Amino acid sequence: EVQLVESGGGLVQSGGSLRLSCAASGFTFDDYAIGWFRQAPGKEREGPLCVSSSDGSTYYADSVKGRFTISRDNAKNTVYLQMNSLKPEDTAVYYCAATSLVVVTTNSALYDYWGQGTQVTVSS
């Protein structure tokens, strides 16, 4: 059974930091690119915010570039999202998703597997 399980969300003050984790199982993790998405209340899903591909490439959306860092530990089948300088507008449910494409893709329709999400709330 394929599973993506996010963790690490919570409440943080503006300017603070959080590290999210996405633990994967049930597929060959090394062969998949993992992306992070988010959905704020009343808004459409946004993303990918960043992507870590199986060939080592990364992608960052302009909205998070310089503040968020994606990394992966293939030995642990886990991808991390380090979020610094958080802003109230970063408040959302954050999801990780996996695609079998080798190259980075920003097309969310091409992501095969999705986690259940973790809530991040940034207070002002």
Image: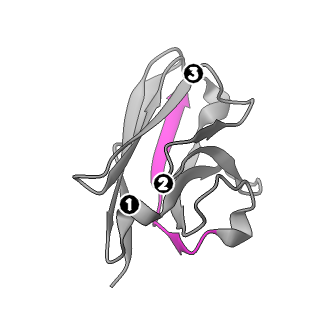
Neighbours of disc 2 within 10 Å: few (<14), some (14-19), many (20+): many
Residue 40 seen in this snapshot: no
Q: Given contact means CB atoms under 8 Å apart, are the residues at marks 2 and 1 in contact?
A: yes
Which residue is rendered at x = 72% and y = 71% of the image? 109
Q: Position of residue 60 (x, y in %)?
A: 65, 35
Element type where label 2 sits in the image: loop
Q: Is residue 14 left or right of residue 21?
A: right
Q: Earlier in the sequence, mark 2 or mark 3?
A: 2
Q: Earlier in the sequence, mark 2 or mark 1?
A: 1
Cα separation between marks 2 and 3: 22 Å
Q: Where the N terminus falls, by quadrant?
A: bottom left
9 or 11, which is in the foreground?
Answer: 9
Q: Quadrant of residue 9?
A: top left
Q: Is residue 118 left or right of residue 122?
A: left
Residue type (three-letter) at the residue carrying disc 2: Ser
Name the residue beneath numbered marker 3: 67
Element type where label 1 sits in the image: helix
Which residue is rendered at x = 53% and y = 62% of the image? 97
Cα separation between marks 1 and 3: 25 Å
Cα separation between marks 2 and 1: 6 Å
Q: Is residue 1 left or right of residue 108?
A: left
Q: In the image as oriented, which residue stretches furthest toward the bottom?
A: 1
Magenta-drawn segment:
111-123
Q: In the image as oriented, which residue stretches furthest toward the left?
A: 75
| Relative vertical location of residue 35 with respect to residue 8 in this rendering, above or below | below
Neighbours of disc 3 within 10 Å: few (<14), some (14-19), many (20+): some
Residue type (three-letter) at the residue carrying disc 3: Arg
The circle drawn on residue 30 is: 1
Name the residue beneath numbered marker 2: 54
Residue 54 seen in this snapshot: yes
